[in-house]
Image: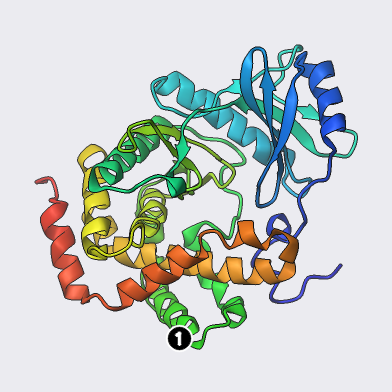
Amino acid sequence: MTQTPADAPLGALLTVAPPVLSPAEAARHLSRHWGMIGALEALTSERDLNFRLTTDRGRFVVKIANSAEPVEQTRFQNRALRHIAERDPALPVPRVVATRAGADDVALPSGHLMRVISWLDGTPLHAAPRSPAQARALAVGLAHLGLALQGFNDPAASHVLQWDIRHAAHLRRLIPHVTDEGLRALCAAVLDRFDAIAAQFPDWRWQVVHNDLNPHNVLVGDDPDTLAGIIDFGDMVRTPLICDLAVACSYQVASQAGGDPLARFVTFAAAYHGVLPLTEPERAALFDLTAARMVTTVAIASWRAARHPENAPYILRNFPSAQAGLTAFAMLDRATVAQALHDALPMEAS
C-alpha cells in the first residue's frame, strides 16, 4: 500500500501490526531450537510479539521481531547486549540466550526473527512509588549504561527511528492527530524551538544509546529506590548522547502528583551528570530536547492509537505523563530553568 504523507515519518516499523504466532507454535520452535519447554504467557509490545516463558530453569522472554524490522537491526540488539555484559557485567540488563546451535536467534518460516533473553525480576517503575532517591538511582544506572555502550559500533546502529529525538521535526505531519487544541499548540511551539537547536547536532557527542528509559522499561527492587533492571532495547540507536538523557528526563517531570517538576528534572539530570558529565551545549539544549521527546510521545501515540485501536491502551500508556510534562514545562520560566541547570550541573574547568 502506498504511504500517505502522515504515514511517511513513521516508517514501516511503526505502521505494521505486530507478528501473529500462537503459543503452541512458539513452544514448538523453543523446543526444537533452544531445547526449552515451559509455560508461555503473552506480554504487551508496541510492534513485536513477546512471551514470558517459565521453565524449570527459570523465566525468560521470548521475542518475535516484526518482519518490518530488518534482521540486522534485531541482531544489533543482541550484539549490544553482549557488549554491555562484557563491559559492565554488574548492569542489570537482559542476557542473550543462545540456541542449541550457538546462534543468538532463529529465522522463522514466516520471516520473523525469534530470540530468547533472560527475565529480570523486579517491579515495573510505573507500578512503584516514586522518590528523589529513586530518580537519582535511575539516572546513575542510565549513565553507567551509556558508559558501557561507549565505543560500541554496529552497521545497523544508524537506522532511522521516529522515536529518536533528532528526527522530531518530522512530527509536524502528525500534530493534526492530537485532538486537544491547546496541546497541539504546545507541541508546535516545542518543535519551533527544536528547529533552532537541531543544527548543533553534528557537533555533539554521538554513540549508541538505549533511547527509551520510560517507566515500563525500568524495574525496581523490593526497595523501590534501587534499580533492578533496564529492559527493552528495541529503540536503541546511534544518536547524540544527550538525547538518551532527554528521553529519560521526559518521564521524570510528571512522575508523581504534586511537587516541583523543575526539581524532579534537575535532580535526575544532576545525578546523570555526576557519572557522565554533560558539555555546556548539551546542558543548554537538555530542556528543549526533553520537551521534544514529550511531543514525540504525544504525536506518535495519538496517531497510532487511532490506527490500531485494538492496541490503544498499550500505545497510550505514556500519553498522560507526556501531556502533563508539556503543560508543566510551558509554565516554567526559561531563565529560571537555565539557572537551575547551571547551578546543579557544574562544568569541569577546561
Give the image quarter of residue 111. top right
Is residue 151 depicted above or below 217 in this figure?
A: above
Is 26 left, or right, of 257 in this rendering? right
Counting from the top left corner in percent of width and height, residue 326 is at: 39, 72
Q: How is the image coloured?
A: rainbow
Is residue 247 depicted above or below 209 in this figure?
A: below
Total labels: the figure holds: 1
Is residue 322 depicted above or below 225 in this figure?
A: below
Is 58 left, or right, of 5 in this rendering? left
> What secondary structure is found at the residue carrying circle 1?
helix
Is 306 left, or right, of 67 in this rendering? left
Which residue is most to the right?
A: 109
Q: Amino acid at mark 1?
A: Gly
Residue 277 seen: no
Instruction: Name the residue located 16 percent from the left edge and 52 percent from the top edge.
Output: 345
Q: Quadrant of the N terminus?
A: bottom right
Instruction: Name the residue located 35 percent from the left edge and 53 percent from the top edge.
Output: 204
Determine crowd level at label 1: few under 14, some 14-19, many 20+ residues with C-alpha closer than 10 A. few
Counting from the top left corner in percent of width and height, residue 124 is at: 47, 41
Is 298 left, or right, of 330 in this rendering? right
218 vs 54, nearest the viewer = 54
Counting from the top left corner in percent of width and height, residue 313 is at: 63, 60
Is residue 349 depicted above or below 340 in this figure?
A: above
295 vs 192, nearest the viewer = 295
Which residue is most to the bottom?
A: 181
Q: Which residue is mark 1?
A: 182
Instruction: Name the residue located 58 percent from the left edge and 82 percent from the top edge.
Output: 179
